[in-house]
Amino acid sequence: MLWLIGGVFLMVWQHFVELPAWYMENLLWVQCTLVGLIGGLIYCLRGVYLNKCVRKSWDKEWEVWYCLRPITSAISGFVSFIFLKAGLLVLDAATKPEHISYGYLAIAFIAGYNVDNFMKKLEEVASTIWGIKQSRASQDFGGDSDKDKQQ
């Protein structure tokens, strides 16, 4: 819950306080990281609600996952920015420059909300461009899909 409050605070705070120039120059990647974090937190909160309240099947073994998921989601949000900026993922939805940042933020949210499928998509891109094979984690394990089976 602290992750969510901190992420929202940083997103709102930047509009009311004069921030250093270096921060403003790097604002989009910071926002992508925070939006990825928020996507992961929403996914975790949904999982807590479903497993603890609805199904009454809370499993303590998953507590580490609930703590680490927001971190991996924030990293995925940042990685989505890198791939979009490099042109390895392409946004076609908006042609106006002022709308581009919304596309970056939308992809960052999706990357944070569904880390497993985002990583699979990145592996597909890597396979297509550089011929890199899928990792064993993507081939052997379901990642979040295992969690979804429990949910």
Image (cartoon, helix red, strand yellow):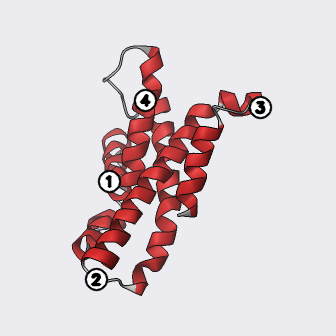
The residue that label 2 is drawn on is: 56
The amino acid beneath tag 2 is: Lys
Choose the circle earlier in sequence order: 1 or 3: 3
Residue plotted at (39% across, 39% down): 107
Front disc: 4 or 1: 4
The amino acid beneath tag 1 is: Lys
Choose the circle earlier in sequence order: 1 or 2: 2
Residue 36 spot, x, y in % from top left: 47, 48
| Real-space CA distance between mark 4 and mark 1, rounded to the nearest whole angstrom | 23 Å
The residue that label 4 is drawn on is: 102
When the figure is inspected, residue 145 is found, relative to residue 57, above or below; the finding is: above
Query: For the view shown, which residue lies furthest in the top direction?
Result: 96
Whether residue 76 is visible to the viewer of this picture, yes or no, is no
The amino acid beneath tag 4 is: Tyr
The amino acid beneath tag 3 is: Pro
Front disc: 1 or 3: 3
